[in-house]
Image (cartoon, rainbow, N blue to C red):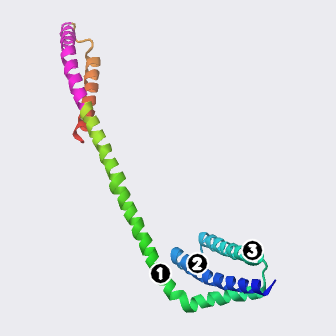
């Protein structure tokens, strides 16, 4: 490995140390500090460190064909220490501001979605349901009016025949009347709701 490649590798490793510090702060800020052991957090930690290792190896692969030397790890440690000493406070303030902006944009998009899409859709569905109920009530009223005047003579004839013959179908007629009353009662309950 030539001197130029060694210097580029050390510089890339120091920058990766800075990257490691900032990504670790971001990771801890987004997921929160660890309070107790959880398998999901352990899996996230493992995947985080695997991703960081792959990113570092990708940088080394680009800079020096993936040769790993001990002094490169010292350069990463130097970059991490430089981040903690010089850039940590500034980056954390920047991260908090960025997260507040992202949170504000997210809340705006949620409110916008509710105002533009969800609330009008709910209102439209309520309107369709109310119009449907008005239509059903109107059809039921017209139908019951016609049925009442159509079958009224038949019921009178049956009642007259029943009275003259000693009421042999009284039980059946009472059951049909009870069924009609219960259906009318159920319909009236739905009619009163809107």
Q: Which residues are magenta?
A: 137-164
Q: Is residue 73 magenta?
A: no
- Residue 127, position as x, y percentages in the image: 28, 42
Residue 48 lies left or right of residue 172; in this view the side is right
Picture quarter with the N terminus: bottom right
Q: Earlier in the sequence, mark 1 or mark 3?
A: 3
The answer to whether one can see residue 156 in this image is: yes
Q: Earlier in the sequence, mark 2 or mark 3?
A: 2
Callout 2 touching callout 3 (CB < 8 Å): no
- Residue 93, position as x, y percentages in the image: 46, 83
Seen at 76% across and 83% down, the residue is 5
Please name the residue that numbered disc 3 is placed on. Answer: 61
Q: From the viewer's side, name the closer residue of 17 and 3.
A: 3
- Circle 2 residues within 10 Å: few <14, some 14–19, many ≥20: some
**Residue 94 circle label:** 1
Disc 1 from disc 3: Cα separation: 31 Å
Seen at 46% across and 74% down, the residue is 99
Query: Is residue 37 placed above or below 172 in the rendered structure?
Result: below
Q: Quadrant of residue 155?
A: top left
Query: Is residue 112 placed above or below 161 in the rendered structure?
Result: below
Disc 1 from disc 2: Cα separation: 13 Å
- Circle 3 residues within 10 Å: few <14, some 14–19, many ≥20: some
Q: Quadrant of residue 106?
A: bottom left
Seen at 52% across and 74% down, the residue is 30
Please name the residue that numbered disc 2 is placed on. Answer: 23
Q: From the viewer's side, name the closer residue of 92 and 123.
A: 92
The answer to whether one can see residue 35 in this image is: no
Q: Earlier in the sequence, mark 1 or mark 2?
A: 2
- Residue 180, position as x, y percentages in the image: 26, 25
Q: Secondary structure at mark 3?
A: helix
């Amino acid at each position: 490995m030539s001197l130029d490649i060694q210097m580029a590798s050390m510089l890339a490793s120091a920058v990766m140390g800075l990257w490691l510090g900032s990504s670790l702060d971001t990771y801890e800020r987004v997921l929160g500090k660890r309070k107790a052991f959880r398998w999901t957090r352990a899996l996230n930690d493992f995947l985080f460190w695997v991703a960081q290792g792959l990113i570092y190896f990708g940088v080394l692969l680009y800079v020096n064909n993936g040769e790993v030397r001990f002094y490169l790890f010292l350069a990463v440690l130097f970059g991490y220490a430089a981040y903690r000493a010089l850039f940590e406070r500034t980056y954390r303030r920047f991260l908090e501001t960025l997260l507040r902006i992202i949170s504000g944009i997210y809340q705006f998009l949620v409110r916008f979605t509710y105002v533009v899409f969800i609330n009008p859709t709910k209102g439209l569905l309520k309107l369709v349901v109310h119009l449907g109920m008005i239509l059903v009530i109107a059809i039921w009223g017209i139908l019951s009016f016609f049925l009442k005047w159509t079958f009224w003579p038949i019921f009178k004839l049956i009642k007259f025949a029943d009275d003259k013959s000693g009421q042999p179908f009284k039980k059946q007629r009472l059951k049909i009347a009870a069924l009609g009353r219960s259906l009318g009662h159920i319909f009236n309950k739905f009619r009163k709701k809107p």
